[in-house]
Amino acid sequence: MSGRFGFCLALVCCALLFALPAAAAPAAESGDTISVRGSAAREVAPDVAYITLGVSARDEKTEKAGAETAARVDGIVKSLAALGIGKKEIKTENFSVRPVYQPEENRRERAAAYEVENILTIHIRNLDAIGAVIDAALAAGANKFSGVRFAASGAAALQKELLSEAVRDGREKADIVAQSAGRRVGALLRAEVDGAGAQARALKSLDAAEFAGNQIFAGAITLTASVNLTFALEQTGGRQ
């Protein structure tokens, strides 16, 4: 009985060994693929803006520097309230207290003063009011300006549409290449979202006073999406 069992087991093992190369054959052909990059872009008009500005004060004592910064920020908040911008639209982006060092004769540095900085981001829905908001903040004591960023409130939904367009663009490119080579595109084997975002003109960080009285134009935001796709390639005659 045990002899028959061992004989049958040996037959099964041999059958598996002979079957393995046939099963691995499709994997060996897995390199017969085409990889493409699909992309899509669309320009949209922004309807919101984020202004980043703030206050920096320096004094030998942190208490005095902090008090001056607080007073100026309070003035900025009040000036914005007069323009219809409430505290819900104002966020502290960064608050810092750092020593300002001064070298001495023995080459050791000592803290000669302390600088207290409070940077705010202001959410603006009325883009025509951007210049007035900046001017009001400057008049209230703002001395730091980090820029204006524009955005579109419906960008998330549009971004999904662009991803679909990017996939279609990638498939069209794959079809063109495959047909030119006498092949046809098969199943999608791999897909990766390479990038999706918005590209908008931004104002760089400069001294706040340089922006007083200047007009700011939103322009357009370019939304983009791109994907990397890998397809199987098939023979036009139906053979893979």
Image: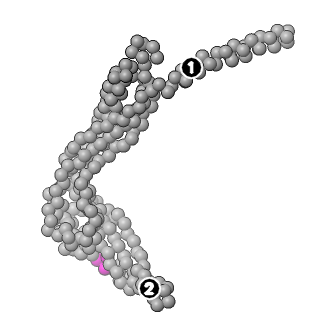
The percent coordinates of residue 213 (x first, y second) are 14, 68
Mark 2 element type? strand
Mark 1 element type? helix
The percent coordinates of residue 6 (x first, y second) are 81, 13
Which residue shows up at 34% across the image and 35% down it?
Answer: 38
Front-most of 218 and 22?
Answer: 22
**Amino acid type shown at disc 2:** Pro
Q: Can residue 104 be found in the magenta stretch?
A: no
- The majority secondary structure of the magenta stretch comes to helix
Image height of 99 relative to 223, above or below:
below
Front-most of 53 and 88?
Answer: 53
Front-most of 148 and 7?
Answer: 7
Which residue shows up at 37% across the image and 19% down it?
Answer: 182
Q: Quadrant of the N terminus?
A: top right
The percent coordinates of residue 31 (x first, y second) are 49, 27
Instruction: Point out the stretch of residues depicted in magenta.
Output: 67-71
Image height of 154 relative to 57, above or below:
above
Q: Which residue corresponds to mark 2?
A: 103
Which residue shows up at 25% across the image and 52% down it?
Answer: 200
Disc 2 and disc 1 in contact, CB within 8 angstroms: no
Which residue shows up at 38% across the image and 86% down it?
Answer: 60
Measure the C-alpha gap from mark 2 to mark 1: 73 Å
| Residue 204 visible here | yes
Quadrant assignment, res 207: bottom left
Q: Which residue corresponds to mark 1?
A: 25
Q: Which mark is residue 231?
A: none
Q: Dot 2, crowdedness within 10 Å: few (<14), some or many (≥20)?
A: few
The reply, left or right, for residue 24 in relation to residue 40 is right
Compare marks 2 and 1 and give the one earlier in the sequence.
1
The reply, left or right, for residue 207 in relation to residue 6 is left
